[in-house]
Image: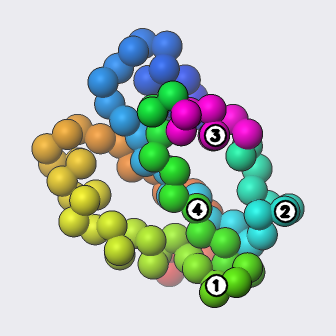
Amino acid sequence: MGFLERIKHESLKNKAILYFGCKKSTSDYIYWDLLADYVDSSILDLKVAFSREGEWEYVQKLLKWDLESIQKLINEDNAYVYICGNLEMGK
């Protein structure tokens, strides 16, 4: 949240992408209201994976789908990429 506030208040040209993984939208999707404000302000591109709803989706899958655009954003646009979720996903 601190990085997003910095981008917002310093009017930085950078845009952040947040890959957020949680089990359920009804119980684990914390800060959704604050994150929605950043999305509405075009500061944040939010990608959410719910691992216990519908077709179980994980952050790793979203990252794989977006690999080329992530590389472009990092290499050409100086973008920030944040990945949030359970530590187990790192394995």
Q: Which mark is residue 26?
A: 2
Q: Residue at x 45, y 46 (%)?
A: 45
Q: Residue at x 41, y 40 (%)?
A: 16
Residue at the left extreme?
A: 76
Q: Which mark is residue 56?
A: 1
Looking at the image, is mark 2 or mark 3 earlier in the sequence?
2
Q: Position of residue 57 (x, y in %)?
A: 58, 79
Q: Is residue 65 magenta?
A: no
Looking at the image, is mark 2 or mark 4 earlier in the sequence?
2
Q: Secondary structure at mark 4?
A: strand
* Residue type for callout 3: Ala
Distance (Cα) linking label 2 and label 4: 13 Å
The coloring applied to the image is: rainbow
In this rendering, would 3 be left or right of 75?
Answer: right
In this rendering, would 29 be left or right of 41?
Answer: right
Looking at the image, is mark 4 or mark 1 earlier in the sequence?
4
Q: Which residues are magenta?
A: 33-40
Characterize the magenta stretch by its predominant secondary structure.
helix
Residue at the front extreme?
A: 40
Distance (Cα) linking label 3 and label 4: 12 Å
- The reply to whether dot 3 and dot 4 touch (C-beta < 8 Å) is no
Q: Position of residue 51 (x, y in %)?
A: 67, 78
In this rendering, would 4 be left or right of 53?
Answer: left
Distance (Cα) linking label 2 and label 3: 15 Å
Q: Is residue 87 visible?
A: no
* Residue type for callout 2: Thr
Label 3 sits on residue: 36
Looking at the image, is mark 2 or mark 1 earlier in the sequence?
2
* Residue type for callout 4: Val
Q: Is residue 36 magenta?
A: yes
Residue at the bottom extreme?
A: 55
